[in-house]
Amino acid sequence: MTGMNNQPIGIFDSGLGGLTVARAITERLPHESLVYFGDTQRCPYGPRPLGEVQLFVQQICSWLASCNVKLIVIACNTATAAGLAMAQQVFDIPIVGVVEPGARAAVRATRNRRIGVIATEGTVESGVYQEAICALDAGMTVYANATPRFVELVEEGLRRDGDLEQVEEDIREASLHPDFVRIAHDYLDPITEAGVDTLVLGCTHFPILESAIGEAVGDGISLINSADETAKDVAEILAYRGHLNDSDQTPQHRFITTGEDLGEFERLGAQIFGAPLDGLEHVELTS
Ligand code: DGL
């Protein structure tokens, strides 16, 4: 098909977290234009019934498809768990989730074939990671735990002023606080005691917590961040289809939020994305 190459890549998340994936994609594919959609109004997805999240996925994919995107990345683990399969059946462009790339990286990294996963309640309850990991190697043992307080901690950290390094530093400091240490141990001890050597950060917010989680689990456990793995997949799919943008034009990104507070989305989002979110737009979706 001609004319595909210059079309943007659509990316969405329940809010800001998917910008970790958007950033990884622009680092790997600097010529590609993006349309990023953050469904801030209905965030968090983690505690919602999967059927409801599936409707959100369908709605946002339709919205992105109407922007003529050439591929959609569901940059949210909960949305991937709830709606990736449906979206792939309904839409006629490639749709990529974040679960399979993370599962693949974990299967490659583990030496003892015991993998831990931390994610939202929705993702853990859906069993998608167990399924994706065991589809690659049926001999794997997976220990998954829902860690909703980690999402809150990242959001609190982001609400303070400062660039991402400062936020990460603040979070690292907060991670020494006895309250965090207790929460982290409650969440992570059952996984480390199960003898895993690899831990999947199965939520878009967790790359920001990577060093704090690393400290809590100790050395000897590899942490898997699916943002980079997903970006690799996107690059491969577009290359294979001959849809990479090969023009020298500066990419044009669009950022959309369903939330009311554009100023906050812009400020926090720029920290995660690593560049200003120029021309942020508000879009209303009916529930
Ligand atoms: N983006 C979600 C995920 O990766 C985390 C935040 C939420 O619960 O919406 O699962």
Image (cartoon, rainbow, N blue to C red):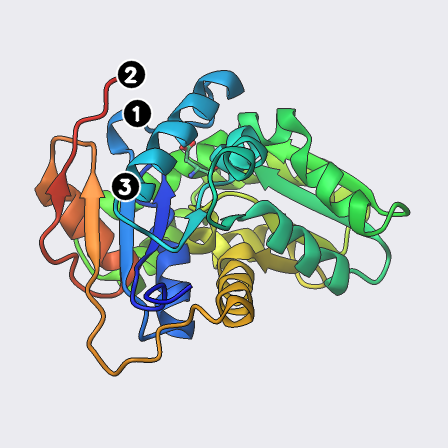
Q: CA distance from mark 1 to mark 3?
A: 21 Å
Q: Which mark is residue 42?
A: 1
Do we see residue 185 in this rendering? no
Name the foreground residue: 154 vs 203: 203
Q: Position of residue 234 (x, y in %)?
A: 49, 62
Name the foreground residue: 261 vs 97: 97
Q: Which mark is residue 66?
A: 3
Relative vertical location of residue 85 with respect to residue 176 in this rendering, above or below:
above
Closest to the camera, between mark 2 and mark 1, is 2
In which quadrant of this rendering is ligand 1 seen?
top left
* Residue that badge 2 annotates: 287
Task: Classify residue 4 by image quadrant.
Answer: bottom left
Q: Position of residue 284 (x, y in %)?
A: 17, 27
Q: Is mark 1 within 8 Å of ligand 1?
A: no
Q: Amino acid at mark 3?
A: Ser
- Of label 2 and label 1, which has the lower sequence position? 1
Q: Position of residue 282 (x, y in %)?
A: 13, 37
Q: Which mark is residue 278?
A: none
> What SS does tag 1 mark?
helix
- Of label 3 and label 2, which has the lower sequence position? 3
